[in-house]
Image: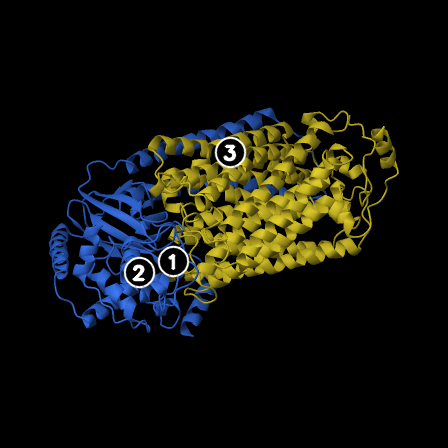
Amino acid sequence: MRVHAKRAGALLGGLVFPTWSMADWTMNMTPGVTGTSNDIFSLHMTILWICVVIGVVVFGVMFWSIFAHRKSQGHKPANFHENTMVEILWTIIPFVILVVMAIPATATLVDMYDTTESEVDIKVTGYQWKWQYEYVDQDFGYFSNLATPRDQIENRQDKGENYLLEVDNPLIVPVGKKVRLLLTANDVIHSWWVPEFGVKKDAIPGFINETWFRVDEPGTYRGQCTELCGKDHGFMPVVVEAVPEEEFNTWLAEQKAAAEKERELTQKDWTMDELMARGEKAYQTACAACHQPDGSGAPPAFPALKGSPIATGDMTAHIDIVVNGKAGTAMQAFGNQLSEVDLAAVITYERNAWGNNTGDMVTPKEILDYKNQQ
Amino acid sequence: MSAVADTHAQEHHHGPAKGISRWLLTTNHKDIGTMYLMFSFTMFLLGGTMAMVIRAELFQPGLQIVQPEFFNQMTTMHGLIMVFGAVMPAFVGLANWMLPLMIGAPDMALPRMNNWSFWLLPCAFLILVSTLFMEGGAPNFGWTFYAPLSTTYGPPSTTFFIFAVHIMGISSIMGAINVIATILNLRAPGMTLMKMPLFVWTWLITAFLLIAVMPVLAGVVTMMLMDINFGTSFFDASGGGDPVLFQHVFWFFGHPEVYIMILPAFGAVSHIIPAFSRKPLFGYASMVYAVGAIALLSFIVWAHHMFTVGVPLAGQLFFMYATMLIAVPTGVKVFNWVATMFRGSLTFEAPMLFAVAFVILFTIGGFSGLMLAIAPADFQYHDTYFVVAHFHYVLVPGAIFGIFASAYFWLPKWTGHMYDETLAKTHFWLSFIGMNLAFFPMHFLGLAGMPRRIPDYALQFADFNMVSSIGAFMFGATQLLFLLIVIKCIRGGKEAAAKPWDGAEGLEWTVPSPAPYHTFATPPEVK
């Protein structure tokens, strides 16, 4: 109720004093934190002012006619219908303005396309509906999923400050370094955008696009996917944390150690309960978006798992579809997206949750063997 | 022998046939024009209803009314229905009614094909709309249907969508052939090309655009059809195909398409502004050349829709410069309209109100278009609400206000009655306010960073979205008033004179109001 009252107040205030009220009424682009985004901002302001000036002149003449040359004012019509001089002028002047505008635009564009001499390279892969970040030459990477709880989206809980703009694992980059992104996609076209960097580039299956940025301010920067990529297109944010170099290096070392530890987990002997617990977590991040938290799916595109022939039938077929996906459908190959442990856990979970009580269990080692056989 | 008998029979042909067969079998350009206009308005209401669903969901953050799957179906169907069902058929309807009257022809050159091209449309849209009720739902990949979202990942109904696009494409191409044949062959003696009314000129050029690009659209959907059903990999990277190829082919169609939707409105407004300024159109010849230039340039700017896909630098620069160039002929047209009003004797009946709003608001849409043309800045604008604001400014107060202006301008000629001026002005002002309230805040949303085609958004976008939704509801509800005005005008009202507007010029005003079922059986002489 209070939110409504506040918003109604803001609505009224915003209509009366658009620039005067709260920050929610931002009307213009804001300059960002990279050189590129500042260049873009100044281009934006230049072209905006050019448009405003032309608009004032053209609409000025028009409104002058509307007020002064009305029939009700007794104005008698003139009868001119051409003037070569004027017509040539208003062709040439806009052309000259455009040429003037094109010069800084060209310079900025050339700079934006210069991806050479990068200091950190990160491969970004778009998936339905998450981002994968891989640190090239560092041999590790991870997925970045929406962290906003379903309850907030469905209005059962108050929305947090960074509603829909928060992820579990943000992209971490060092400040002051030229970061080059190599973008591609696994399924459909996505687009990686952080407004404060002035960076937006499509991630296209089968292509590798390049872009770059250099952030000088440490901080958290938020953006979103900007290419329609299916049902959860609105739910795959981009969050980048820029940290000082030392912090970045420590983090990098930790991550590499953690990745090593994860690989060791494959060899551990897992119990059913451990697998079920881990499987539920992995299921919620990797599978629930399509197959739903309760396994009921959204047929026909996303079949139910509850009581399904795959999840209750032959184990090998189940492993195959999770690891290799199903061609021609939205079912992705999770073999490279999830670790052996998570694959084993998810499959075990799917075979025993929601009344699929098959009692089957598959271990990470078995998954590894399956993968090696292929 | 039979040719002689036919000519003889036509002289005794006075009124329309009775009953349903009048509409099913008609070859009369006025009947077909009326059917096109009615069909277009029906589609306008249907597409508008979908827009209301979209705006209702976006009224507040969070998911309230529809789920994301259905939201995507709504944005897709809204776009497809408005572009192919509302705007394009409305202009074909105006062309059917007005082209023969304006050039002094007895009918369109190919009347039977005319009937056929109309009746294909309801079939196409029945198929398209029926996909909403199919398993898996309607197309949900946006009206631009980018592959591979629309091919590998599309719903089963995609094949029906492709079939519908093929049928409407055939309809458009036949309509365009008819327009060209009519204009080039049936002009009254003495009407040279440079004496043609501007609506005729703009439609002639539009028809050439249609013939050039509708087959390209047909090609791209056929490639999709093959990818989906016959195992080819035109757009599938894993089979050696190229998803970006889809976008190149689609926008080679798509950019001229946006001019297809606006050029006839340019033409109509170029009649309405002089009529209510009581002063001849300024710069007739430069208007014609400007439309020609816009049409030619429209073929070499398509990749400005694709600035973020990774076009090489040289390509990026070429498409940026070419796009900026379009501002020059477009500017010439706006300057000419303003110069026409300058030192005229202006009155502001409904057609003029819509035409003046057209010039102002279309220019605003043109300005944001110029901003979008600046490739580096486009990296920020691309696929945000700024783009949504831009194309709604050129399509709603552009194409649709152009259609309303034309409808009010020619309604007296069509029905023989004057429409209710007070109601029409109310329709204008409510539309004007509603439309600006709906679409202007979208500029701010886009600049603040809101992506398009999302069913839910971060909290900082909440306020302007609410304003926008209120404006949209207002605009949407107002359009029912137009229906009322037209029905009222058909059923009665003040008798219209042959030339109800004292500043209007052209052959259409030399025939009585309402225009008789057959006009210009003997061609008039143009001096």
Query: Which chain does the residue under circle 3 lie in?
Result: B
Q: Nearer the viewer, residue A277 or A161?
A: A277
User: As shown in the figure, which amino acid type bears the numbered disc 3?
Assistant: Ser
The disc at residue A232 is 1
For marks 1 and 2, give the CA distance: 10 Å
Task: Give the class, few, some or many, for how many residues have Cα within 10 Å of label 3's Cα (few <14, many ≥20).
Answer: many
Give the secondary structure at mark 2: loop
Residue B375, percent from left and from top:
38, 38
Is residue A201 shown above or below A367? above
Whether residue A17 is visible to the viewer of this picture, yes or no, is no
The residue identified by callout 3 is B298
Q: In the figure, the blue chain has which letter?
A: A
User: As shown in the figure, which amino acid type bears the numbered disc 2?
Assistant: Leu
- Contact check, label 3 and label 1, Cβ < 8 Å: no
Residue pictured at 61% horizontal, 57% vertical: B430
Give the secondary structure at mark 3: helix
Q: In the figure, the yellow chain has which letter?
A: B
A313 vs B107, left or right, is left
The residue identified by callout 2 is A146
Q: Are marks 1 and 2 on the same chain?
A: yes
Q: Nearer the viewer, residue A246 or B212?
A: B212
